[in-house]
């Protein structure tokens, strides 16, 4: 968990708040995240922690330690957000999710944002601007009307900063006044808009990233599929604030990937079982299946080998008449006894041990482990010193 | 039941550590002390530049290669990078070769064989490539968190106590202090400030009126085993000369205080005013080479003889 405090809490559209959090202290651990990920935040309403909810990060990790969330104000929880004041504590967990911007991506990128689903894309575009990505990016941003467009001035600035970024606004209703010079469509994202904007096809493969309310994404998913876009090029982020279903990432794996995995597992398990079973069975001698002449040759070899074995003398020492070899120390000399114990004194071989300098003791330097002092009651105050 | 201030101390990290916890009984703090010492030892094991097995040593020894790093190492390095920016490069953990060339090569406490980086150079933090998984620095550099470690450890222990819902404590890591809550008399913690003229005496007090206060003192010299040693090693020249001999900073965290005390001591009153105006520090106390040059900024610091203060304008 990361502790943050509210730096700013402002309304950026009639229904969307921008919440800026800064670390509670400079020394604390800071949230590490990739552009587009989301985090879980917990507020302290009337000094009691609220339930945790997930929101996409609008900020970019390239822009310092402050983090930002854009949140649609609707329902009890997000209403509590309105009451947040500068300095209030907010606990953050995360970051989560695979819906992230990858500057190494080789394909052109098409971002579809529906309403508050713009949040992760703002973080991605800020990041893209900071690292000066050379990717072609087309953001198609759908809102109910002009006043619901969040981050409009920033999107205009980002489009100027990123030559390969194109932003298209799709307004469900209302006029386009004040949006002169911008690329605006009326209605919904449909086949006409997709064709007019060349969003599908072209010489370069495109990757589509979708974020918005579930009905919006379902419709877009069906539209792209109908246009022949393979599933693997579509990534979506379910973004349903104020419902039980929190933000999650849906990765579209081909269904047969699971079947292939299962089949592979079964084949390997079978091979291992057969191998183990084979080890437990008696070995079948190959010569019994061999041709007649080979069998005769093998039989001859067997006979000669058997003859050889019979000529080898016994290897076990059965002579118990001798004592084992031993040595002992006497008057600083090692006495090595090489003959049987019954040998005479004259038969003993005396070996003088050469003088060897005593080696330096091996010193292993070890860490000194000190135990703390026992617990005491103190009256004297603490003191700050140069150490 | 009457509350008392219970204390345990330990020599670790090459310095003296004192932990004060306010509680109703001795039994209530024993386990807490044990857990805090475990944290201290774990910190030392990871970040000691003297321990040949520490993670920091492993990185210094394999400089030039991409080395896997722990989350803790990553966090502290990124934090150091922030302070490096805040202090315009003055705080630089990659100064270790210069620190060693100044004589700080052998551990004063532990009997480890010295790890010698004196032939390496001091590089900038931009030359180090770091990600959550790996760190790569030039082959001829070495780093150490000596300039931030004590304050950072105090804050870590503070977070640990906060998470255990412990509210009243005062932690001193080699003179860097983190005070939180109230003392046993339910009054604000009062911290005494060492005198630059006579290190055995105190010259002022700071009353911690805010719920959390990090306090650190930095001096041009330190006295260890009755030997005076140069204590600030930097390739940046001080802007004000040695008008001030000691600086005490009170900030929201002990790490802030630790880093900013050295920074302000080096760059004098302009740096102090800048940090104060940006609300990065609560109070600053610069002890002049002569008493006439004493300088106090912010509230809470009171001179014991109540004289010779140059007020902030």
Image: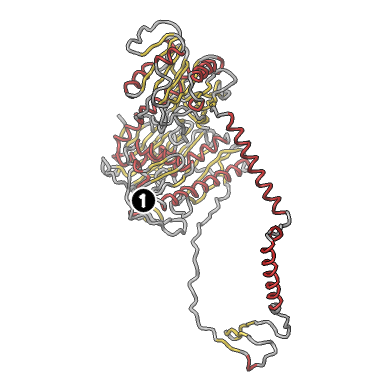
Counting every numbered tag in the picture gives 1
Query: B90 and B183: which one is in front?
Result: B90
Residue B228 x/y as whole percent: 35, 54
Of all residues, the one furthest to the top in this rendering is A174
Tell me the subunit letter for badge 1: B
Residue A102 x/y as whole percent: 43, 31
Q: Tell me which residue sits at (53%, 54%) in the image.
A: A370
Residue B132 x/y as whole percent: 46, 39
Query: B285 and A28: which one is in front?
Result: A28
The answer to whether residue B82 shows anywhere in this view is: yes
Of all residues, the one furthest to the front in this rendering is A293
Residue B275 x/y as whole percent: 35, 32
Q: Tell me which residue sits at (39%, 26%) in the image.
A: A204
Quick check: B203 above or below A144? below
The N terminus of chain B: image quadrant? top right
Quick check: B80 above or below A255? below
Query: A384 and A18: which one is in front?
Result: A18
- Judging by the rendered image, the residue that carries numbered circle 1 is B139
Left or right, A288 with respect to B12, comes to right
Query: A261 and B28: which one is in front?
Result: A261
Label 1 Cα crowd, 10 Å radius (few <14 / some 14-19 / many 20+): some
The answer to whether residue A387 shows anywhere in this view is: no
SS at badge 1: loop
- Scheme of colours in the image: secondary structure
The C terminus of chain B: image quadrant? top left
């Amino acid at each position: 968990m990361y502790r943050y405090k509210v730096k700013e809490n402002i309304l950026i559209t009639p229904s969307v708040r921008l919440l800026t959090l800064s670390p509670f202290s400079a020394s604390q651990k800071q949230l590490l995240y990739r552009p587009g990920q989301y985090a879980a935040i917990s507020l302290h309403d009337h000094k009691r922690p609220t339930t945790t909810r997930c929101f996409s990060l609008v900020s970019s990790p390239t822009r310092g330690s402050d983090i930002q969330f854009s949140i649609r104000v609707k329902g009890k929880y997000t209403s509590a957000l309105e009451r947040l004041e500068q300095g209030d504590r907010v606990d953050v967990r995360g970051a989560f999710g695979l819906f992230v911007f990858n500057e190494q991506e080789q394909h052109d990128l098409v971002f579809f944002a529906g309403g508050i689903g713009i949040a992760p894309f703002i973080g991605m575009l800020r990041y893209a601007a900071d690292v000066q990505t050379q990717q072609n990016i087309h953001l198609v941003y759908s809102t109910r009307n002009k006043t619901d467009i969040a981050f409009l001035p920033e999107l205009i600035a980002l489009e100027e900063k990123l030559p390969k970024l194109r932003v298209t606004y799709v307004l469900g209703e209302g006029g386009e006044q004040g949006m002169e010079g911008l690329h605006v469509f009326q209605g919904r994202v449909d086949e006409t808009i997709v064709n007019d904007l060349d969003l599908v096809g072209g010489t370069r493969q495109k990757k589509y990233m979708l974020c918005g309310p579930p009905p919006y994404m379902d419709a877009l998913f069906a539209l792209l599929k109908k246009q022949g876009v393979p599933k693997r090029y579509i990534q979506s982020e379910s973004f349903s604030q104020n419902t039980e279903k929190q933000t999650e990432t849906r990765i579209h794996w081909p269904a047969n990937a699971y079947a292939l995995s299962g089949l592979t597992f079964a084949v390997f398990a079978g091979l291992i079982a057969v191998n183990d079973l084979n080890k437990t069975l008696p070995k079948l001698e190959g010569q019994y299946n061999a041709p007649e002449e080979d069998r005769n040759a093998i039989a001859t070899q067997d006979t000669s080998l058997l003859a050889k074995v019979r000529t080898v003398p016994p290897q076990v020492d059965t002579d118990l008449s001798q004592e084992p070899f031993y040595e002992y120390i006497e008057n600083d000399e090692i006495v090595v006894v090489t003959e049987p114990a019954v040998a005479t004194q004259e038969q003993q071989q005396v070996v003088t041990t050469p003088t060897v300098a005593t080696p330096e003791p091996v010193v292993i330097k070890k860490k000194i482990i000190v135990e703390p002092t026992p617990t005491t009651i103190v009256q004297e105050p603490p003191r700050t010193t140069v150490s | 039941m009457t509350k008392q201030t219970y204390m345990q101390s330990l020599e670790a990290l090459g310095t003296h550590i004192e932990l004060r916890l306010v509680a109703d009984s001795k039994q209530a703090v024993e386990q807490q002390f044990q857990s805090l010492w475990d944290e201290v030892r774990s910190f030392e094991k990871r970040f000691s530049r003297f321990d040949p097995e520490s993670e920091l040593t492993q990185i210094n020894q394999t400089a030039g290669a991409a080395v896997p790093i722990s989350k803790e190492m990553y966090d502290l390095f990124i934090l150091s990078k922030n302070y490096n920016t805040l202090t315009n490069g003055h705080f630089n953990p990659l100064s270790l070769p210069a620190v060693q060339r100044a004589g700080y090569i052998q551990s004063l406490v532990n009997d480890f064989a010295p790890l010698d980086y004196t032939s390496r150079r001091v590089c900038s933090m931009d030359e180090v490539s770091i990600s959550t998984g790996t760190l790569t620095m030039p082959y001829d550099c070495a780093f150490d968190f000596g300039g931030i470690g004590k304050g950072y450890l105090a804050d870590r222990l503070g977070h640990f106590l906060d998470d255990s819902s412990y509210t009243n404590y005062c932690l001193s890591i080699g003179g860097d202090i983190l005070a939180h809550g109230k003392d046993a008399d339910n009054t604000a913690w009062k911290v005494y400030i060492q005198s630059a003229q006579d290190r055995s005496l105190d010259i002022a007090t700071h009353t911690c009126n805010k719920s959390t206060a990090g306090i650190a003192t930095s001096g041009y010299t330190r006295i260890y085993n009755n030997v005076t040693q140069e204590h600030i090693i930097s390739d940046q020249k001080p802007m004000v000369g040695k008008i001030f001999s000691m600086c005490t900073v009170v900030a929201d965290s002990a790490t802030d205080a630790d880093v900013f005390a050295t920074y302000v001591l080096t760059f004098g009153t302009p740096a102090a005013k800048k940090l104060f105006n940006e609300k990065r520090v609560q109070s600053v106390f610069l002890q002049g080479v002569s008493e006439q040059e004493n300088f106090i900024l912010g509230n809470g610091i009171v001179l014991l003889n109540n004289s010779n203060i140059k007020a902030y304008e």
